[in-house]
Image (spheres, rainbow, N blue to C red):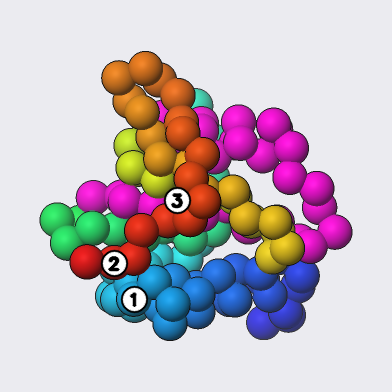
Amino acid sequence: MVLTPEEWVRQHFVHFLIDKKNYPTSLIALEKQLTINNRKKRTDILVFNTEGTPEIIVECKAPSIKITQDTFDQIARYNLKLKANFLIVTNGLDHFYCKMDFENETYIFLKEIPDYK
């Protein structure tokens, strides 16, 4: 496998989730496929809770890619289907953490995501 800049970001973020936030590797899936509007898409990192439902979606971009509203729109579309509680967008340099507010159909920016309990 070629270590693309995006893959480098993904690998580092997985290590962050495991080593710093204590998420078990057994709850982390890479490039999980989903279908949106009859098109196959893949989440970069998907973290499940112990019930097996999506808890966190992580969208990884290469460090040279600026994170824009389009990036958030992409992860929000994925979340219409997955209904995860947290969304993360990272390019390895900038990280944006959001908690979903399903009642108001929006997200709240956080300083960081919670540690695994």
The magenta-colored residue range is 53-82
Which residue is painted at 45% across and 24% down in the image? 106
Disc 2 residue crowd, few under 14, some 14–19, many 20+, Cα 10 Å: few
The earlier-in-sequence mark between 2 and 3 is 3
Q: For the residues marked 1 and 2, what is the alpha-carbon distance in whole angstroms?
A: 5 Å
Which residue is painted at 23% across and 50% down in the image? 53
Residue that label 1 marks: 22
Q: Is residue 6 visible?
A: yes
Can you give x and y, in whole percent of width and height, for residue 77 in the image? Answer: 51, 31
Disc 1 residue crowd, few under 14, some 14–19, many 20+, Cα 10 Å: some
Give 27 or 1, whichever is nearer the viewer. 27
The earlier-in-sequence mark between 1 and 2 is 1
Q: Say whether marks 1 and 2 touch (CB < 8 Å).
A: yes
Residue that label 3 marks: 57
Horizontally, residue 46 falls left or right of residue 89, namely left
Q: Give, as a three-letter code, the residue at label 3.
A: Ile
- The answer to whether residue 66 is magenta is yes
- The answer to whether residue 27 is magenta is no
Q: For the residues marked 1 and 3, what is the alpha-carbon distance in whole angstroms?
A: 16 Å
Give 21 or 50, whichever is nearer the viewer. 21
Return the mark for residue 116: 2
Horizontally, residue 80 falls left or right of residue 50, namely right
Horizontally, residue 56 falls left or right of residue 90, namely left
Q: Give, as a three-letter code, the residue at label 2.
A: Tyr
Q: For the residues marked 2 and 3, what is the alpha-carbon distance in whole angstroms?
A: 15 Å
Q: Helix, strand or loop at disc 1?
A: loop
Residue at the far left: name it.
51
Q: Say whether marks 1 and 3 touch (CB < 8 Å).
A: no
**Is residue 94 depicted above or below 109 in this figure?**
below
